[in-house]
Amino acid sequence: MRKRTDAPVTIVTGARRGIGAHLARHYLELGHLVVGCSRKSVEWRHERYAHFALDVADERAVRELFRTVRDQHGRVDHLINNAGIASMNHALVTPLSSVHGLLSTNVAGTFLFCREAAKQMQKRRYGRIVNFTTVAVPLKLAGEAVYAASKAAVETLTAVLAREFGQFGITANAVGPGPVDTDLIRGVPGEKIDELVSRQAIRRKTTLTDIANVVDFFLAEASGMVTGQTLYLGGV
Amino acid sequence: MIDRLITVVVRSAQDVVEREGIELREELGPDTPLFGRNGVFDSLGLVSLIVGVEEVLSDQFGASVSLADERAMSQANSPFRTIRSLAEYAAGQLEPSDAQTD
């Protein structure tokens, strides 16, 4: 017998650190039942939080996650596809293995979670999907060819999925933050970050609160007419 | 086996029919056309049916199968013609040699 819950069920990928961890805690504070995942387990606990240690591009593991969520909660309301890896490197010295790894996590992983979440969402004719892109796409940043290309793929994926899922009551949108103080940009030289920020209308780094604000908007029940959109922060 | 799978497909089809408020001309059975001329479902309904059948196959048979794979799409006679043809295709997918597709 499946347990039904009144609390919205929100899945957050890449929930161990940075943006994902912040969003997981944010939605726990709002009363959601949050299911997170990352390659490694998390050190914190919450009575409404469950964590899966997996590779987001591992089809078998991802299917198992969704099967467990279906058996335990009977629904998926929100998917926040935050998991991603970056690679700041000149194209001439970028190994092909980096390209495959990046596309696997950022594109295949995002697709896999969208597909499995939408399978459950379509039964209730309701769902909200938020994918993650970056300002590196519109700014066409040198040194981020593969990373930006993978996120351009995520944007197109989001726009097409919005059309495929629309009749099921599922929206799909993408948020594109500027540089955020997380591990993802730890290795990027300070002057590169400053240069990037100087190309934004709002010349500061993106905060976790800035991102949560946009995700809140995309997840809102009232945002049923908002789909297929990419929203960049900072004004690019 | 095939009778069990026909039951799986009929029940999954019934779920979609009820969810989408489809009016049936006659009761669902092995020869009910699923898609195309006189078919019960439009393309979205067929997608929902396939998702539902895959879910039951996973739950009842422990098999992770993709019914709308390249092999299904390339067949001269679509496995999505009738309830029976879909059940037969599912049976083929559940055979030990290709029960696990991932």
Image (cartoon, coloured by chain):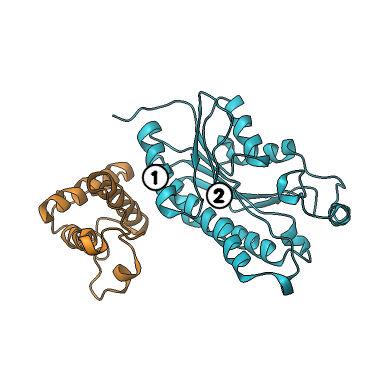
Nearer-N-terminus badge (2/1): 1
Question: Chain B takes which shade in the image?
Answer: orange
Which one is nearer the viewer's eye here, A73 or A121? A73
**What mark, if any, has residue A172 been given in the picture?**
2
Q: CA distance from mark 2 to mark 1?
A: 23 Å
Horizontal and vertical percent for residue B12? 25, 47
Between marks 2 and 1 in the image, the one whose residue lies nearer the viewer:
1
Residue type, label 1: Glu
Is residue A87 toward the left or the right of residue A197 in the image? left
**What mark, if any, has residue A42 been given in the picture?**
none
Residue type, label 2: Ala
Q: Quadrant of residue B88?
A: bottom left
Q: In this rendering, does residue B26 appear at all? A: no
Q: In this rendering, does residue B30 appear at all? A: yes
Q: Give the total number of marks visible in the rendering.
A: 2
What residue did someone put label 1 on? Answer: A64
What residue lies at 23% left-to-right and 45% top-to-bottom?
B60
Q: Name the subunit of mark 2.
A: A
Rendered-image quadrant of the C terminus of chain A: bottom right
Q: Are marks 2 and 1 in contact (CB under 8 Å)?
A: no
What residue lies at 65% left-to-right and 62% top-to-bottom?
A152
Q: Name the subunit of mark 1.
A: A
Question: Chain A takes which shade in the image?
Answer: cyan
Which one is nearer the viewer's eye here, A137 or A226? A137
Is residue B74 toward the left or the right of residue A107 in the image? left
Horizontal and vertical percent for residue B100? 30, 58
Is residue B39 toward the left or the right of residue A132 in the image? left
Mark 2 lies on a secondary structure that is strand
